[in-house]
Image (spheres, helix red, strand yellow):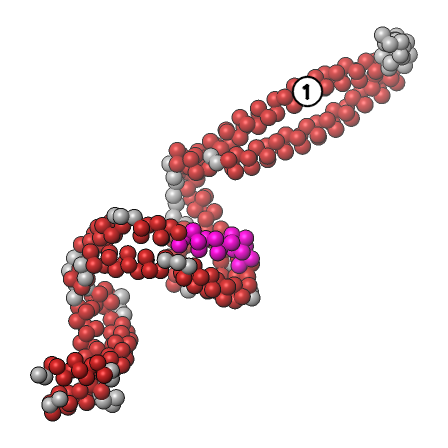
Amino acid sequence: MDVAAERALARLRDPSGDAITELARLTVLETTATPLREIASPRWLASQLATAMEATTQGDLLGQWVTRRLEHERVRFHEEDRSVRSFVPPEAEEPLRRVIGRPYSPSEPLALRLIDQAAVNDLLGEILGHTISRFRERLAAWDGGLIQSVRDTANERSRGLMGGFRSPLNMRRNLGTLGGMAENLVGAVRDEVEASVESRVKEFVRGATRDAVQSIARQLASPERAEAFAELRLSLLDVVLDTPVSELAQEGEKLQPEDMVEVVVAALRAAVAAEDFVDRAEQRIALILDETGDGTLAAWLDEVRLADVWTTTTTELVATRLGAVVHQPAFDTWWEGLFR
């Protein structure tokens, strides 16, 4: 290696020098100043995305890694008594509330398709059936008290009137007083009404359930109720934010998150296995890059006032990796070849 090459290599490897840092900074500035669509082609990005997804979904490595992370976080979550709100930055909560509290009314057909489900219908039917049963019980209690009152009053005022009649079985029945006649008459009517009601309850509940579901969908789709449902969503958000993390963790256990991991991994594996995955990904990436036009990462960082922080921290990272590279024997061979 000639003298110039050795001197340049020494400067690159000098821990007290700034040659590597300056090289790293030039690399960072050049990359961030290059339009995003010129850094890499949509096809290359799509292919790399497919390769990465295929690698992560092969076998059980991804699922095992996520499961280990879940097990690690479970302990921490179940011991955390602070509320969710204490972990949400105030700067993020207000925009979140604005989005969730925005009045919104879905179309009535969509609302009906969403709620017209077996679970909803069964729940409404059970509630209606229970309400009707309770009403019948109360009506029966009131009815029984009324009959007894009529019977007692009639017995007092017409004791012995018409004597006692004998039934066809030659058994004396309480038909000889106005009270007995009233009791048997009303009782017969009540039995007939109850038998009729019993046969109609199920039919009524089915019809009432359908009407209730349609009414709920109509109310959900009503613009007049958009504000009220927005307030409901905000109230639900407050309940979640004010709930201790440990309580939410207990509820989360009921959902068996490990099974969800398997579902997500299977979905990703199926998606990346599709023959047109790369083509579709390329189209979407191309659209995004076309929207950015000549936009650069540096321009966006400058707009959000993070350009200096990004450049400094990224330069440190790149300089560290370059410092490791220049000390490799393979770099000596490559470097010497440049001066031949």
Q: Is residue 177 visible?
A: no
Residue 130 forms part of the magenta stretch: no
Residue 253 position in % (x across, y down): 54, 56
296 or 91: nearer the viewer:
296
Looking at the rendered image, the quarter that the C terminus falls into is: bottom left
Q: Which range of residues does the magenta coloring cover?
A: 249-265
Indicate left or right for 205 with 191 as reference.
Answer: left
Residue 308 figure quarter: bottom left
Q: Residue at x 89, y 9 (%)?
A: 170
Indicate left or right for 250 with 90 as reference.
Answer: right
Q: Residue furthest bottom?
A: 3
Q: Residue at x 11, y 90 (%)?
A: 2
The residue that mark 1 highlights is 195
Residue 261 forms part of the magenta stretch: yes
Residue 254 position in % (x across, y down): 54, 53
Element under label 1?
helix
5, above or below 119, in the image: below
282 or 336: nearer the viewer:
336
Looking at the rendered image, the quarter that the N terminus falls into is: bottom left
Q: Residue at x 38, y 50 (%)?
A: 267
295, above or below 178, in the image: below
202, above or below 161, in the image: below
184 or 54: nearer the viewer:
54
Residue 157 position in % (x across, y down): 87, 15
Residue 160 figure quarter: top right
Magenta segment, prevailing SS (helix, strand or loop) = helix
Q: Residue furthest left?
A: 340
Residue 314 position in % (x across, y down): 27, 74
**At label 1, which amino acid type do we have?**
Ala
330, above or below 230, in the image: below
Q: Residues within 10 Å of mark 1 (few under 14, many from 20)?
A: few
